[in-house]
Image (cartoon, grey):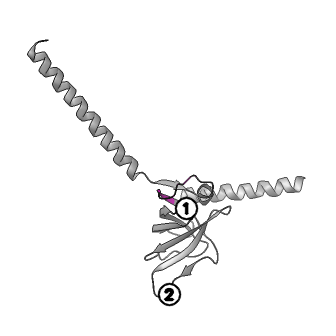
Amino acid sequence: MTPARRRRLIMVMVIVAGVAIATTLGLRAFQRNLLYYFTPSQVAAGDAHPGQRFRMGGLVALGSVQRAPGSMTVRFTLTDMQHSVPVVYTGILPDLFREGQGIVVHGRLDKGGLFTADQVLAKHDSKYMPPEVAAAIQKAMQAQQDAVKAKGAS
């Protein structure tokens, strides 16, 4: 092999190695910043792992909002009408946050099953609900109706 070919081969190998390293670093950064969406039923089924950052959506359960006196910490339960997950959030809640409201929370689940939210998002108006939340609630209601029909048929 001539010296010119050897230099070209080394240059091509360095470029290929550089592209491989850049691709690996890019994919690792993408994976680290990926934010999954789960419903309370999926969390109860174990689809979400403790310590993993994810979004969770549902309705704020009626009678579940508890505010800690003298602090900005709020505890409430998020439900999809089948399963519920306790949530704790410290910060300013959106003006539209209330019981029975469709919301999406961002944060982490601890090993005890408590979801610690970093951010709480509430719907814009009385007719809007995040698509994922609406689909999960519709699926839960359909499952309840199917169970009632099956019970009545037997």
Residue 136 relative to residue 9: left or right: right
The label on residue 69 is 2
Q: Is residue 69 magenta?
A: no
Q: Which residue does the image show at 35% across and 42% down from the upper left?
A: 27
Give the secondary structure at mark 2: loop
**First reached walking from the N terminus: tag 2 or tag 1:** 1
In this rendering, the answer to whether 121 lies above or below 5 is below
In this rendering, the answer to whether 112 lies above or below 74 is above
Q: Which residue does the image show at 59% across and 54% down from the upper left?
A: 46
Q: Is any part of residue 123 visible from this angle?
A: no
Q: Which residue does the image show at 9% across and 16% down from the upper left?
A: 3
How far across and how far down the image is residue 128, in percent? Answer: 54, 64
Question: The N terminus is located in which quarter?
Answer: top left
Residue of label 1: 57
Give the residue furthest to the right.
154
How far across and how far down the image is residue 22, in percent? Answer: 27, 39
Residue 77 relative to residue 1: left or right: right
Q: Nearer the viewer, mark 2 or mark 1?
A: 2
Which region shows up in magenta?
Answer: 47-55
Foreground of the two, 128 or 62: 62
